[in-house]
Image (tube, rainbow, N blue to C red):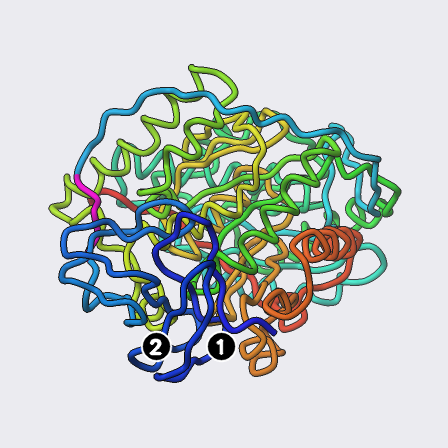
Amino acid sequence: MKDFIRIHSADTVAVALKPLAAGETYEVGNRSVTLREDIPQGHKFALDLIPAGQTVIKYGCSIGVAKEDIAPGSWVHIHNVKTGLGELLTYSYEKQDTTLEKTADAYFQGYRRPDGRVGVRNEIWIIPTVGCVNNVAEAIEKQAQSYVGGSVEAVVSFTHPYGCSQMGEDQDNTRQILADFVNHPNAGGVLVLGLGCENSNIEELKKFIGPCGERRVKFLVAQECEDEIREALELIGELADYAGSFRREPIPASELIIGMKCGGSDGLSGITANPAVGRFSDLLISKGGTTILTEVPEMFGAETLLMNRCETEALFEKTVDLINDFKNYFTSHNQTIYENPSPGNKKGGITTLEDKSLGCTQKSGSAAVRGVLKYGETVREKGLNLLSAPGNDLVASTALAASGAQIVLFTTGRGTPFASPVPTVKISTNNGLSRKKENWIDFNCGVMVEDTTLEEMGDRLFDYVLEVASGRKVKAEEQGYHDMAIFKQGVTL
């Protein structure tokens, strides 16, 4: 096992791959560095003198500015480094070659829907139009478990607090996200449960849903029923008959749409799990598949790397808007643009937003950006897509699923039990987390600090995703977890 890594030849810091003790001397390139203090795993130490005011380089890019002179061998973190980010920036398009060679086809066992789309699960979803019927939706879910069996894999309700007392864009966002889930191919059948007097009532929601099969989607207005639970269970029975007619069949990996997200990051996130997801993304795209990268605030400081991979100048302009619109969202609420790394992030070794963003964007691999999506917009272009959504784990993962992702890959250095509306694969960045939280973690990339190469890790992850797409349950699914969170931006009446 290596003791440390210098990620890029231009870096002025190295990262400890295990706890390192003060007084130890290490050879880094053509220099010897003696540690002046203990360096925790995932944290950085200076390779040379970094004068006050000079940029600190990691991943070959600036992750901030030294607040004071930092001597060689010193711990480099929030006490002596500050962000170098400012407000809105002006960008220029410097297109980068992003050609990926096509690779051999791969297949998984999925569900082909009548409209040609593909699901990796065959579930019945209960979608409330408004938070007022959440308890009813949950009661229906509990009483409908008898319909699970055969190819019907689950009956799940997705509760939320919205659908009424919202205005403008918030109201439309709620309707669009709910409509996206009604149309999601992981659902073999859907019950849309309304109250009757809400703003986002069923008739309004139908305008966003569009055409949908009568056998696949059922609607119920609770205020119009004598016993809404009894009538709902009758409809669930009809949906189970329909959904139960589907069977898994061989599907090419080119039909996969995979969301990519990270949370509870640590200093190894950008060295192990995120690059492995990036390798996976390139591999899937090389077979004609699609990936989606989101959490826009965690692109700040690394956005130009994505902008220059845009396939066209029009996509570059969309990416500029993606970044600046989110910065304007922050400033319109009198919030600091660059105050992002959480206490857990900092404890794990992430110093600034640039540090976090450069690690986060490793998940995008090296492919060209072929689509830029608004919040709630569904994927139309195969390849790498960027999606407008915040960094919040539940909100961003919900947004990925709403945009069409059948599976979400979630890398973490701290661990989390949450789920999303689709299978959410928890990928650990370090071995300790994988051992400690076996009930949370599905796939461990911590072995990359030992002797597993990036190529090997990415290939293993690809094979694992095909297993999940073919029906293997992730840990959150085994525990019955399903979460949904809609992005709220405006006024509540």
Residue 150 point in image, percent of width and height: 85, 59
* 471, 277: nearer the viewer: 277
Measured along the vertical axis of the image, is residue 169 above or below residue 219?
A: above
Local crowd size for mark 1, using a 10 Å CA cut-off: few (<14), some (14–19), many (≥20)? some
User: Is residue 202 shown left or right of residue 470?
Assistant: left
Residue, far front: 30
Q: Residues within 10 Å of mark 2 (few under 14, many from 20)?
A: many
Image disc number at residue 18: 1
Residue plotted at (81% across, 62% down): 149
Q: Amino acid at mark 2?
A: Leu
Q: Nearer the viewer, residue 174 or 420?
A: 420
Of the pair 309 and 146, the residue shown nearer to us: 309
User: Magenta stretch: residue 228 in it?
Assistant: no
**In the rendered image, which residue does mark 2 sit on?**
35
Along the polypeptide, which appears first: circle 1 or circle 2?
1
Main SS of the magenta part reads loop
- In the rendered view, would you say 326 is above or below 13? above
Quick one: SS at disc 1?
Answer: loop
Amino acid type for the residue under numbered disc 1? Lys
Residue 492 seen from this side: no
Identify which residue is drawn at 23% across, 38% down.
Answer: 327
Residue 274 position in % (x across, y down): 53, 54
Q: Position of residue 17 (x, y in %)?
A: 50, 71
With 323 as the anchor, is 285 left or right in this view? right
Residue stretch in magenta:
82-86
Image quarter where the N terminus lies is: bottom right
Give coordinates of residue 24: x percent, y percent.
41, 81
Label disc, if present, on residue 37 of the rendered structure: none
